[in-house]
Amino acid sequence: MKRIAVFGSTGSIGTQALSIIKSNPRRLKLVLLTCRSRIDMLRRQIEALRPEAVAVEREDDAIELRREYPGLRIYCGRDGLNEAAQTVEYDVMLNAIVGIAGLEPTLAAIAAGGTGKTSNLVIALANKETLVTGGRFVMSAAADAGVAIVPVDSEHSAIFQCLMGNDGNAIKRIMLTASGGPFRGYSLEQLKSVTVGDALIHPNWKMGRKITVDSATMVNKGLEIIEAKWLYGVEASRIEVVVHPQSIVHSLVEYEDGAVMAQLGFPDMLVPISYAFSHPERWATDARNINLITLRSLQFDEPAGETRRSLDMAYRVMRESEESGRDSGAIALNGANEVLVQLFLDGKITFLDIINTLERVLDRHNSRMVKGIGDILEADRQARESALSFVGR
Ligand code: NAD
Ligand code: MG
């Protein structure tokens, strides 16, 4: 029986994870739920899965929940979230928080894993921003503590699966697939007039709003280049992005002998989430089967157009990190993106403002080495400020 802690339980990944936990009552036991808002949904989750503890953001939500569920341990605020990560005992942390807010809970879990309270702690990481902002630091802390980081992001899970049975073999190249999002093939002129509603309709995946916008700008794929670099220890120059509109091939790994391994399947996050819980076993899921005959053909294209610039920014910050050890560029890219996506969702800036402003933030950014969480949070704060100043907020 694996004890599971779900961070970000009310989100797109969190709710799908809970459905997997419900489907596997003899294998998985939920012990902790965390969320920021949607307290009614949290109540339903508490009643269905009876965790030992929950963590919420607001004090008044915590007070109410304490009254309603006297037996439940309730943490609140940012400190409470980190304390829950450190004190509740679990075997697998699913980190499905969105944004850099997921970084500190990851670090708290690694610290707890390092104390030996739980041996073989696994962090099932959906929160890619953890690695984008703290990659070098997080991977080495996890290795020192003996904590495994298993990706949930579908591309990185595909790579993880392609690496199975290839221990010790160098990776020649990683090919990350990208659907291209709703604006694939759009001209600059067309992109000028896209709306929030247009950006929130993803052709293949139903996800949270932030990552859906990131998929439309292709910033998501840029963040995934950085995520892959840290997870698998490969230089960014060995990571290629291939546009694959059907989202059937989830990513590929090429080896020295020319062999290429790929992982395929219907685009459904149940598969990578389930695999993060089950590996090296595989458990049944409700994901649809693919039928190659009805699919007929799979298409692959070079990334092109305006959104290609989002990939270039990721390569640019990774090149700098590799050449000089200065990692703050990725933190700036991520932090600025978080505020710009929110402004776009609020109708305050246009779609292209996101990409244009990110470039300006990076042009102005003074990259530096980051030594720990304090430096990361400071670089994040400065990048947010810088983005806001460029869009006149
Ligand atoms: P979401 O917005 O649907 O859910 C986010 C969850 O995190 C919610 O439970 C919310 O309450 C919580 N949360 C938000 N801000 C928080 C904060 N400041 N502090 C604490 N908790 C907070 O997001 P999602 O689409 O499920 O994505 C979660 C993560 O998984 C992201 O990093 C995303 O990039 C990654 N991811 C998602 C998908 C997908 O299919 N949704 C696929 C791959 C990777
Ligand atoms: Mg992905």
Image: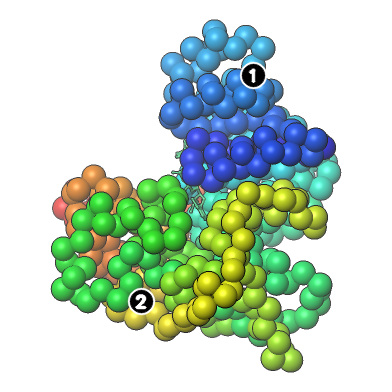
Tell me if I can see residue 160 in this picture.
yes
Which mark is first along the chain, 1 or 2? Answer: 1
Looking at this view, is 224 or 159 the one in front? 159
190 relative position to 307: left or right: left
Vertical relation: 104 (above or below) 61? below
286 relative position to 309: left or right: right
**SS of the residue under disc 1:** strand
Tell me if I can see residue 335 in this picture.
no
For ligand 1, tell me if the residue under mark 1 lies within 8 Å: no
Q: Position of residue 356 (x, y in %)?
A: 25, 67
User: What crowding class fits label 2: few (fewer than 14 Cα within 10 Å), some (14-19), or many (20 or more)?
Assistant: some
- Under mark 1, the amino acid is Arg
Contact between marks 2 and 1 (CB within 8 A): the answer is no
- Under mark 2, the amino acid is Arg
Looking at this view, is 266 or 350 the one in front? 266
Q: Give the residue drawn at x 53%, y 72%.
A: 294
User: Residue 308: which disc?
Assistant: 2
93 relative position to 78: left or right: right
In three-dimensional space, the C-alpha distance between marks 2 and 1, rounded to whole angstroms, equals 47 Å
Name the quarter where the N terminus is drawn.
top right
User: Residue 73: which disc?
Assistant: 1
Q: Position of residue 353 (x, y in %)?
A: 22, 62
Q: Residue furthest bottom?
A: 257
User: What crowding class fits label 1: few (fewer than 14 Cα within 10 Å), some (14-19), or many (20 or more)?
Assistant: some
Q: Position of residue 225 (x, y in %)?
A: 51, 70
Q: Position of residue 40 (x, y in %)?
A: 46, 23
